[in-house]
Structure formats: C-alpha cells, structure tokens
Image (cartoon, rainbow, N blue to C red):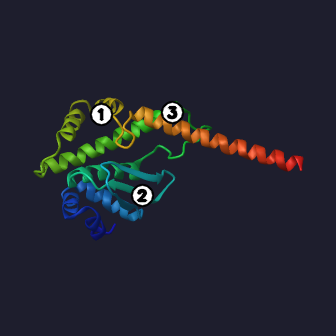
Amino acid sequence: MDRSLLEARFGKKFVALIDDSPLLQRDLRALARLKCRVRRWNGKHAAYSKTDINDRRNALIVIGSKGTPLDKVLQFAHEAYHVLKGFTPSYPDPKMMSRAQYLASSIAEETRAVMHEARVAEELYDKGYLVPARHLRTLVELHRGGYSAIKAEVESSMASISNESYRDTYGRYYDQHVAALERKRLHRLEARKVVCSA
C-alpha cells in the first residue's frame, strides 16, 4: 500500500500513528498484498469496507474525512479487521444461512473488529497518545470481560453509518438482500412464462 497516498489522503499524523502501532503495520502489509484500496469519504465521520470473504483481493476501505487522525486510524484498524479476517458474507444466501445465523455471524465479526480496534488503541495509548474516552472504556471492558463484554457493548451500541443498532442494521441488510433475490427469481419465472407462451 502506497504510504504517500495514505499521507496525501489522511495526513502525516495518520501515517505516523500507523507507524506507532505494530498491529496496524502488520495489517497494512497484509492489505498491500491484497491490493486493498483505501479511499477518503469527504464530509463524513464514519467508515466502511467492502470485501468478498472468498476472494479478499481488491477490497475497499473508506474512511470519513472528519474527525481527528487518531479517530481515522482507529476506524482504519476496525475496517482492516473486516477486510483481513471477516467471515460474514457480504451477500447472504438464504439457502445457506438463515437470518438468525447471519445476525449472529455479523455481531460476532463486529465484536472481533471492535476488539482489534481496542488493541490498536492500547498500543497507541502505551506510546503516549491521548486516546478518546470511549476507546478507553472499550479497552477496560476488553481487559475485564473479554469477548463477552465487548459483544454486549456491540449489541447495545449504534452502527456508525446507519445510526441504528447493529442487530437492526444487519437484519435490515439481510431482509433487503433476500427481497432482491426474490424479485430476481420472480423476474426469471415471468421471463420463462413469456418464452413458453410465445
């Protein structure tokens, strides 16, 4: 991954923060091998990523332009986890995965991404950076209660993009995707009827 490109998009401080986190340095090398693209999202204070769990090459991470360099680096850490180690399919197949299975998988992946973000925050805190209180609270929860505590935190928090609970966000996404698949199936059936009647 071209560091000069990251510096041009997010600033020198962003790159300096990555240099101070061994976890992020490792993630950056792995993302470079996958030819992951990192883009800036002007006017937003959120981030998202897109990847295919079966072929992670050419993934995309998008980070909002608003927020401090530290906020952006922690968002980058979170999305890097999704790209590198995510296990929930982007396009769920209802024949292979029920809505409940999809929600459980999504919440578990989100929990692990938050844990990765907290570990990066800990590395930066140990280097002397002023880490925001919300990340320190997550870090304390990680050390006190581990996965279960972070999962409870994820289930009670709001997704940064949709401003609704993660369960509602992922449930809506599953429902929309299944409805789109059903519309395609009905369209194919209608097309067959037209061909057969001709």
- Residue designated by label 3: 101
Q: Which one is in front, 127 or 137?
A: 137
* Label 2 – label 1 distance at C-alpha: 25 Å
Question: Which element carries disc 2, helix, strand or loop?
Answer: strand
- Residue designated by label 2: 60
Mark closer to the chain start, 2 or 1: 2
Circle 1: is it few (<14), some (14-19), or many (20+) Cα within 10 Å?
A: many
Circle 2: is it few (<14), some (14-19), or many (20+) Cα within 10 Å?
A: some
Which label was assigned to residue 150? 1
Say what amino acid the circle numbered 2 marks: Leu
Q: Residue 122 placed where, x, y %?
A: 19, 45
What residue do we see at 62% from left, 38% from top?
Answer: 95
Left or right? Give the position of 167 relative to 1.
right
Mark closer to the chain start, 2 or 3: 2
Question: Which element carries disc 3, helix, strand or loop?
Answer: helix
Say what amino acid the circle numbered 1 marks: Ile
* Label 1 – label 3 distance at C-alpha: 19 Å
Q: Where is 17 relative to 5, above or below?
A: above
Which label was assigned to residue 28? none
Circle 3: is it few (<14), some (14-19), or many (20+) Cα within 10 Å?
A: some
What residue do we see at 25% from left, 53% from top?
Answer: 73
Left or right? Give the position of 77 relative to 90.
left
Q: Residue 130 placed where, x, y %?
A: 12, 47
